[in-house]
Image (cartoon, coloured by chain):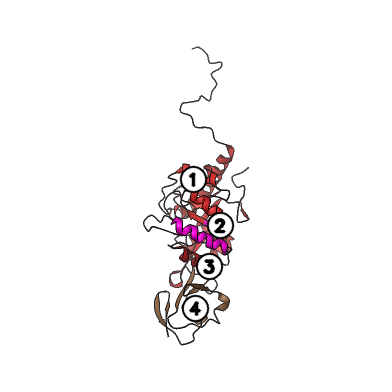
Amino acid sequence: MQLTVNGAGTDVPDGATVAAVVEGLVAGRATGHGRVAVARNGDVVPRSAWETTRLTAGDVLEVLAPTAGG
Amino acid sequence: MTGTDPWIVAGEAFSSRLVLGTGGISSMEVLERTVRASGTQLVTVALRRIEASADAAMMRVLDRCGVRLLPNTAGCRTAREAVLTARLGREAFGTDWVKLEVIGDERTLLPDAVELLDAAEHLVDDGFRVLAYTTDDAVLGRRLADAGCAAVMPLGSPIGSGLGIRNPHAIALLREAVDVPVVLDAGIGTASDAALAMELGCDAVLLASAVTRARDPERMARAMRSAVEAGRLARSAGRIPRRWHAEASTQFEGLPQL
């Protein structure tokens, strides 16, 4: 199914969880899982719900991590 | 009193009156030396899409320095965006403190007063400790304080401009208008600007570019630390009144006829 993840169209298996999408983005990055936050369709998905939140086609995800800021 | 008497925001005391933004820092090594040289205990951070975010080294540096984190809502243009960004910051950084920033104009990065107040009300209701980046308008500052903001943070001049405090009178009026801490945020260019903010009665100074984009960030951080302490001392020492004409400091009595 098609999702929009951080502004880009992304194909994931039906029934994929938030945790799976985050895992895919974090893999190979030095960011680590520690301080990642996720919004789905404009609402926060708490870390405790990543494993149990199944995505549906057309969902819009923002997966964010710390950066420097003033 | 020393220049490092504590100030209290959201129930927490800080001996350093310098709040440091990390935006614009060139490397994690420079960040660590700069944070330590500044003596700061409160540091702003941001969230961005993971592809564009810093690597984990930044958080390791800040954890190692033992500073409290203040996530910002930089880049948000509406109350809705700012509230969601604050909630994501709470999730990512594990703190309910937020530097609330709602921008109304791309060229000047001036705050959008209407969206700002709306966002502040929502976030206070949601349990956040809101430190609100705002204009130097005393009436808006009072509205933000009345809404429950933990601090109001007026700009001295536009973000990153280095133009200093363009309207010192407005900052002094805002200081008189609210009981919560006032933090001069944005526009600081050099040490004398930070000292002036403190002389005007601000409780603290928040700056980023003035240090992170200086030729020698570590040295400028040290300068800002001294300036904030000097300004605080001068404020509490009670400056002399301004006079139109001179007032001799050496007595006239006993002046010889030569």
> Marks 2 and 4, Cα distance to the nearest angstrom?
29 Å
Q: Is residue A47 above or below residue B233?
A: below
Q: Which residue is mark 4?
A: A22
Task: Identify residue for label 3.
Answer: B87
- Badge nearest the viewer, 2 or 1: 1
Q: Is residue B165 magenta?
A: no
- Residue at 52% from the left image edge and 32% from the top image edge: B241
| Callout 2 touching callout 4 (CB < 8 Å) | no
Residue at mark 2 to residue at mark 3: CA–CA distance: 19 Å
Q: Which mark is on residue B171? A: 1
User: Color of chain A here?
Assistant: brown
Residue closest to the eye, B82 or B72? B82
For the question of whether residue B243 can be seen, the reply is yes
- Quarter of the image that includes the N terminus of chain B: top right
Residue type, label 4:
Val
Residue at far left of view: B107
Q: Which residues are magenta?
A: B110-131
Q: Residue under circle 2?
A: B42
Residue A60 location (% of width, % of height)? 44, 77
